[in-house]
Amino acid sequence: MSKDNESLHYMNEEAKRKKRMKWTIGIIAFVIFQVLVAVFFVLVIMKFKSPKFRVGEFNVQTLNVGNQASPSFNMSFVAPIRVKNTNWGPFKYDASTVSFTYGGVQVGQATIPKSKANFKSTKKIDVPVTLNSDALPTSSNLGSELSSGIITLNSQGELKGKVTVMFMFKKTKISQMNCTIAIDTTTNAIHSLSCK
């Protein structure tokens, strides 16, 4: 082989080696990109969380209270129930109820219809509620609360449903509501509202 042929052969081999190196780097970069996308998908998109289930602030429409000697109450309002879905897929939930209690005794309830909360959104449901103290035992401290001008209620409920991501991955989630509501009997308004 002549010197020219040798250098031409060497240059061809060098060009082929560089081309193979470019392909190898391209394939490795593509694989790394796919792995990063898969890790992001698993850690962010596929992370199923229980939606938040809360009652919001409301105005008491009617409120009738007794006195310390004859303690009683009955009231009605429209409870703003909120289901906040922070998942990347819709949360379809079954019908449920929210119980309103005073001193651990149920004084009323609200029915939540079957529905769905879209992804990254809050479903707002306004439910009429009527509460009365007929079921309370005479030993309750309702009389002392009425004299202070505040009635403390609890709202509790459970919402069970499924979160669906990418139309095929489904996971059952249960949301719990546990809120404490203090109602001012002189202004018929919410004095304080806190949910866990």
Image (cartoon, rainbow, N blue to C red):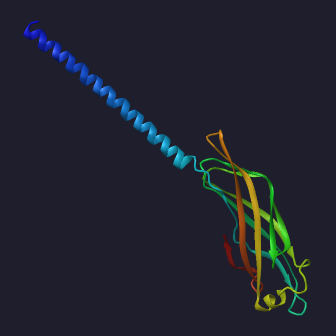
Residue at 82% x, 68% y is: 129
Q: Where does the N terminus fall, quadrant-wise?
A: top left
Q: Residue at x 81, y 76 (%)?
A: 104
The answer to which of 142 and 24 lies nearer the viewer is: 24
166 sits left or right of 145 in the view: left
Outermost residue, front side: 1
Q: Give the answer, above or below, for where 72 lies relative to 165.
A: below
Q: Position of residue 108 (x, y in %)?
A: 85, 71
Considering only vertical position in the picture, is 7 above or below 191?
above
Give the residue drawn at x 8%, y 7%. Answer: 2
46 versus 152 height, above or below = above
Q: Position of residue 93 (x, y in %)?
A: 74, 52
Examine the image and state in which quarter residue 188 appears. bottom right
Q: In the rendered image, which quarter contains the C terminus?
A: bottom right
Numbered disc total: 0
Quadrant assignment, res 52: bottom right
Residue at the farthest left position: 3
x and y, in percent, of residue 6 in the image: 12, 12
Give whichever of 158, 5 is nearer the camera.
Answer: 5
At a point 65% along the width and 56% down the height, the residue shown is 50
Q: In the picture, residue 8 is in which quadrant?
A: top left
User: From what the image shows, is residue 152 above or below residue 117?
Assistant: below
Q: Position of residue 91 (x, y in %)?
A: 68, 50
Residue at far top of view: 1
Q: Nearer the viewer, residue 88 or 128?
A: 88
